[in-house]
Amino acid sequence: MSAPAPLLSLREVSRSYGSPPTTALDAVSFDVHSGERVAIIGPSGSGKTTLLNLIGTLDRATSGEVMLAGQRISQADDAQMSALRAFLIGFVFQQYHLDESQTAVDNVASGLLYRGLPRHERRERAQEALARVGLSERAGHTPKQLSGGQRQRVAIARAVVGNPPLLLADEPTGALDSRSGTQVMSILESLNEAGTTVLVITHDRDVAARFPRQIAIRDGVVESDSGPVWRDESRPALQKVT
């Protein structure tokens, strides 16, 4: 059976900054299929975060093409880029980025602000998302009342409250102790098993080792790629792309 069209596709993507230009990414190409769980690994300064920003439509490539769900990012205007982020992508960052003045449930509900839903429905969905990460009993707590691991789980709930097909996580365990980091990784794995495509940026080889696919990047160039896999919806297992 042939592989379906990729959810995400990069073709000869480069990104330069400044004058004279400094190259952060150089002719990067790979595909990610729906249902994959991918680690992009590399040292500090390797271009990982630049790559995440391009994939997440937070930045545009200097050259090459990024396609998400069949949409050419280079051809999208700002409104279309915002819509792609709102409906197709969930973001998780190392430092959580939670509103300290709001409860966990309202932080999560903020992930639906651009969906045009009434407040009560946003909060209902937020409660469901908190249940998915095991924090139902913490819904009324503010971030100051939560541990680092719990804050990151709230951030994950916010990222997936709208059921985006793609979850992007930038060093999601980087600020956590090993126990909390393991909990967060288990949640990402369970979300992937439920159908979310998960792409994690990390410098931690132990974290990357938990992923079926690893893409190594250094000095803006892909050094190695263990190869894409895709989910055959008629079977529970992931299939290797050949």
Image (spheres, rainbow, N blue to C red):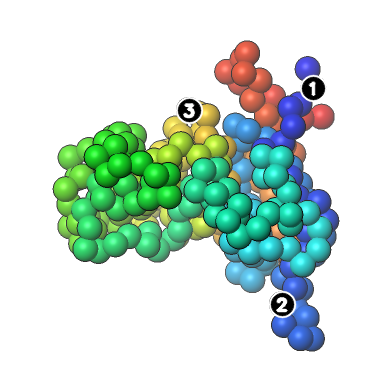
CA gap, disc 3 and disc 1? 22 Å
Circle 3/circle 2 CB separation < 8 Å: no
Question: Can I make out residue 171 in this image?
Answer: yes
| Residue occupying the point 30% across, 53% down | 107
Question: Can I make out residue 226 in this image?
Answer: no
Location of residue 7 (image quadrant): top right
The total of numbered circles placed on residues is 3
Residue that label 2 marks:
17
Residue that label 3 marks:
194
In the displayed structure, would residue 226 be above or below residue 224? above
CA gap, disc 2 and disc 1? 39 Å
| Residue occupying the point 67% across, 67% down | 46
Which mark lies nearer to you, 3 or 2?
A: 2
Q: Earlier in the sequence, mark 3 or mark 2?
A: 2
Crowding near the residue tagged with mark 3, few <14, some 14–19, many ≥20 C-alpha atoms within 10 Å? few
Crowding near the residue tagged with mark 1, few <14, some 14–19, many ≥20 C-alpha atoms within 10 Å? few
Q: Which mark is residue 2?
A: 1
CA gap, disc 3 and disc 2? 38 Å
Amino acid under disc 3: Ala
Decide if residue 75 is on the left or right side of residue 205: right
Q: Earlier in the sequence, mark 3 or mark 1?
A: 1
Location of residue 26 (image quadrant): bottom right
Amino acid under disc 2: Tyr
